[in-house]
Image (spheres, rainbow, N blue to C red):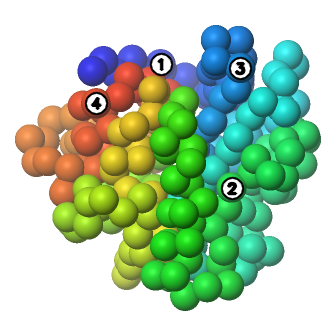
């Protein structure tokens, strides 16, 4: 599959181009298919993008379904929660019906939360995911799939519990690679601080266990917005 690179070195240009790209994806899928299902990532890079996207014109938000590709195992109102991020940015402005906002249950134990969220996502995976928005960690992780990525990330489960010792919140849940690679397209948002990780990924021959994004770019039409 192809990977299109868009260079946007100025922060404001990066944000507006990224939001414009996502808005175009939403509009196109609603026009072509009557709806758009999109998976979103958390993090500091997409925050201003989601704020602008929520105010974009010409989007029938009643036809949009959003889900999280991962979250930290914290309370939903914690500033560390990706649910909190989306509710304080995109969902503050975009009137997406609550029944079409699909989040994991953080009150459950990680394994139970992953299993329950997998049941929630099963219908949209069967129906078809239009797009996923991803980042790339300096260590090479996407969603909450941390290298070395376990084989379970490519298994039959839609969502798995994961753990990392590299960040303050160790317990996570994440959709698996088959969910991400089932999307029609992927958008990767990379700030300036991810340039070295991106270049190492592109130059390295190691597989998805080290660079899980490779599993996506090999199967899904991908656009990378590069902040340099």
Q: Which residue bears the numbered disc 4?
A: 219
Location of residue 109 in the rendering, given as x and y in whole percent from the top left corner: 55, 88
> Quick one: SS at disc 4?
loop
Q: Separation of disc 3 and disc 1 at Cα?
A: 28 Å
Residue located 15% across and 35% down the image: 203
Q: Label 4 near label 1: C-beta < 8 Å?
A: no
Q: Separation of disc 2 and disc 3 at Cα?
A: 19 Å
Residue located 56% across and 54% down the image: 121
Quarter of the image for residue 84 reads bottom right
From the image, which quarter does the N terminus lie in? top left
Of mark 2 and mark 1, the one earlier in the sequence is 1
Q: Nearer the viewer, mark 2 or mark 3?
A: 3
Q: Separation of disc 2 and disc 1 at Cα?
A: 29 Å
Q: Which residue bears the numbered disc 2?
A: 102
Q: Nearer the viewer, mark 4 or mark 3?
A: 3
> Quick one: SS at disc 3?
loop
> Quick one: SS at disc 1?
strand
Q: Separation of disc 4 and disc 2 at Cα?
A: 25 Å
Q: Label 3 near label 2: C-beta < 8 Å?
A: no
Question: Residue 6 shows which numbered tag?
Answer: 1
Q: Label 1 near label 3: C-beta < 8 Å?
A: no
Location of residue 47 in the rendering, given as x and y in whole percent from the top left corner: 70, 47
| Any part of residue 45 in sight | no
Residue located 50% across and 72% down the image: 114
Q: Separation of disc 1 and disc 4 at Cα?
A: 19 Å
Q: Nearer the viewer, mark 1 or mark 4?
A: 4
| Any part of residue 93 in sight | yes
């Amino acid at each position: 599959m192809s990977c299109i690179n868009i260079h946007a070195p100025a922060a404001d240009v990066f944000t507006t181009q990224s939001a414009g790209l996502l808005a175009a994806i939403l509009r196109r899928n609603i026009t072509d298919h009557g709806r758009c299902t999109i998976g979103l990532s958390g993090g500091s890079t997409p925050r201003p993008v989601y704020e602008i996207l929520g105010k974009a014109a010409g989007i029938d938000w009643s036809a949009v379904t959003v889900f999280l590709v991962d979250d930290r195992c914290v309370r939903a109102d914690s500033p560390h929660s990706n649910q909190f991020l989306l509710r304080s940015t995109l969902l503050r402005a975009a009137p997406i019906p609550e029944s079409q906002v699909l989040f994991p249950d953080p009150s459950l134990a990680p394994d139970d939360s992953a299993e329950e969220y997998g049941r929630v996502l099963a219908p949209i995976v069967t129906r078809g995911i239009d797009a996923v928005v991803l980042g790339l960690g300096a260590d090479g992780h996407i969603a909450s799939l941390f290298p070395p990525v376990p084989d379970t990330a490519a298994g039959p489960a839609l969502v798995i519990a994961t753990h990392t010792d590299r960040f303050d919140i160790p317990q996570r849940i994440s959709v698996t690679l088959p969910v991400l690679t089932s999307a029609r397209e992927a958008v990767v948002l990379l700030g300036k601080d991810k340039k070295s990780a991106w270049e190492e990924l592109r130059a390295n021959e190691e597989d998805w266990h080290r660079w899980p994004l490779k599993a996506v770019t090999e199967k899904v039409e991908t656009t990378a917005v590069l902040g340099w």
